[in-house]
């Protein structure tokens, strides 16, 4: 299967053969695997390629001459991950939706796929990573052509709602091919050398490991879907959606989290660290509480020596400090120097869904800094134009690190 045909040199984009996939890994080692030996990097990619998040959901696309589709001298390549998302757009007039008229409940029954309406639609997001062109071919437009062809292909997939990526090459390169790129900020917390006092973490925190986290992650996905429904119905207690606005939520599901954690479990020991076991914590909720407990999930990045928060939710503002204290303590015990917390867009829509760090309220020794990112700039191509035609401003809900690939 090829994606397109007509361009000057008769180049095509097609899914890589198994040999081509391994050839892409060999090339990208110098950019994304520097601290690992080539052997370890190839092994890591092999391990990750069998995760639930990847498997049939990951396609590596290569740009090659039509006459040599199996060449290992590819002109450019990229990885594309298919994952579930919800999108919603508000009519410019803010006319009430069909469901609002019916006064139905906000419970999230299965959402329809591809229904033309002003209700949220569940479908596929295509997240792109590892866009690469070898040195000898750079500056000739190959990566741009590949992105153009990949865009056309993804847009035509059944159930395709968006494509997302995080740009390490600024906003222009991807914007030219159809991915709108946004500014992004994060908080940096310096990890102190002394341990947190036990009272600070105390009995209220339960550590999360890959063995006891699945149900919480599922609950979280359900509550977020419900909140998008509530937004569409106008029953979100915090705010009404803005007329003409578009909303995107990438679901933070178990497959996504497992993929992140597999990386840390592989890379830690490969670089001489102890294999991490704790991937977050939750604050023990009183028995009988129905809501999702306050929690935080993270990944250890042993290459940059940072702990990255993947996702957090809290029910009370004061829970946030306890969750971050646990994250800082985990980083300290694992020999990591910083905790990085992405500043999540538009927290007011999803009260208690994103970090709203107030540095003055946190320990001074953490030296909390807000930083505008130059890497990992979020970018979105909106494909859901049939059901959600608005061209108004886009809000990427819970745009937290879990969505990064
Ligand atoms: C980025 C990359 C894929 C571009 O490949 P390419 O085939 O040379 O790209 P094209 O010829 O289609 O386009 C080149 C444009 O990209 C821009 N570009 C390339 N690298 C860039 C960078 N690091 N930062 C900003 N812009 C960059 C060029 O300035 C050029 O812009 P211009 O046309 O305005 O002069 C290639 O340089 C690469 O593989 N880099 C290493 C891996 C990487 O960083 N990938 C991106 C991850 S998000």
Image (cartoon, rainbow, N blue to C red):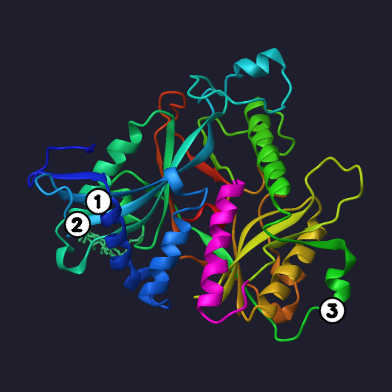
Residue where numbered disc 2 is placed: 74
* Residue at screen point 18% across, 63% down: 138
Span colored in magenta: 252-275
**Label 2's element?**
loop
Q: Earlier in the sequence, mark 1 or mark 3?
A: 1
**Residue furthest out toward the top:** 102
Q: Mark 2 near mark 1, Cβ–Cβ under 8 Å? A: yes
* Residue at screen point 66% across, 75% down: 331
Residue 159 in view in this figure = yes
Q: Main secondary structure of the magenta part?
A: helix
* Residue at screen point 27% across, 50% down: 17
Q: Nearer the viewer, mark 1 or mark 3?
A: 1
Residue 197 numbered mark, or none:
3
Query: Marks 2 and 1, how far apart in space?
Result: 6 Å
| Coordinates of residue 208 in the picture (x, y in percent) | 73, 60
Dot 1 alpha-carbon crowd within 10 angstroms: few under 14, some 14 to 19, many 20 or more? many
Dot 3 alpha-carbon crowd within 10 angstroms: few under 14, some 14 to 19, many 20 or more? few
* Residue at screen point 31% across, 56% down: 21
Ligand 1 shown in quarter = bottom left
């Amino acid at each position: 299967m090829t994606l397109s045909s007509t361009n000057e040199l008769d180049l095509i984009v097609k899914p890589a053969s198994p040999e081509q996939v391994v050839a892409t890994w060999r090339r990208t080692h110098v950019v994304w695997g520097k601290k690992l030996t080539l052997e370890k990097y190839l092994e890591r990619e092999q391990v990750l390629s069998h995760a639930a998040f990847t498997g049939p959901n990951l396609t590596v696309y290569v740009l090659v001459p039509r006459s040599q589709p199996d060449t290992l001298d590819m002109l450019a390549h990229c990885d594309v991950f298919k994952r579930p998302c919800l999108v919603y757009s508000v009519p410019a007039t803010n006319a009430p939706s069909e469901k609002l008229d019916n006064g139905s409940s906000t419970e999230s029954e299965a959402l329809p796929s591809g229904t033309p309406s002003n209700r949220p639609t569940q479908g596929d997001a295509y997240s792109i990573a590892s866009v690469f062109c070898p040195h000898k071919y750079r500056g000739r437009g190959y990566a741009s052509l590949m992105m153009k062809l990949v865009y056309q292909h993804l847009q035509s997939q059944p159930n395709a709602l968006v494509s997302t990526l995080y740009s390490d090459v600024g906003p222009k390169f991807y914007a030219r091919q159809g991915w709108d790129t946004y500014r992004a900020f994060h908080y940096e917390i310096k990890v102190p050398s002394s341990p947190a006092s036990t009272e600070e973490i105390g009995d209220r925190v339960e550590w999360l490991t890959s063995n006891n986290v699945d149900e919480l992650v599922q609950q979280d996905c359900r509550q977020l879907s419900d909140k998008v429904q509530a937004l569409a119905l106008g029953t979100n207690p915090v705010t009404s959606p803005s007329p003409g606005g578009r909303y995107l939520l990438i679901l933070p599901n178990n497959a996504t989290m497992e993929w992140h954690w597999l990386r840390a479990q592989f890379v830690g020991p490969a670089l001489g660290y102890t294999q991490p076991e704790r991937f977050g914590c939750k604050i023990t909720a009183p028995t009988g509480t129905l809501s999702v407990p306050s929690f935080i999930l993270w990944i250890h990045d042993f290459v940059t020596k940072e702990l990255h928060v993947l996702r957090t939710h809290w029910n009370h503002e004061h829970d946030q400090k306890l969750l971050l204290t646990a994250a800082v303590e985990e980083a300290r015990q694992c020999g990591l120097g910083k905790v990085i917390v992405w500043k999540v867009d538009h927290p007011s829509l999803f009260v208690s869904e994103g970090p709203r760090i107030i540095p003055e309220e946190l320990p001074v020794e953490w030296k909390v800094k807000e930083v505008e990112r130059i890497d990992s700039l979020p970018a979105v191509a909106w494909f859901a134009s049939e059901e959600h035609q608005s061209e108004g401003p886009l809000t990427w809900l819970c745009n937290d690190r879990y969505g990064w690939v």
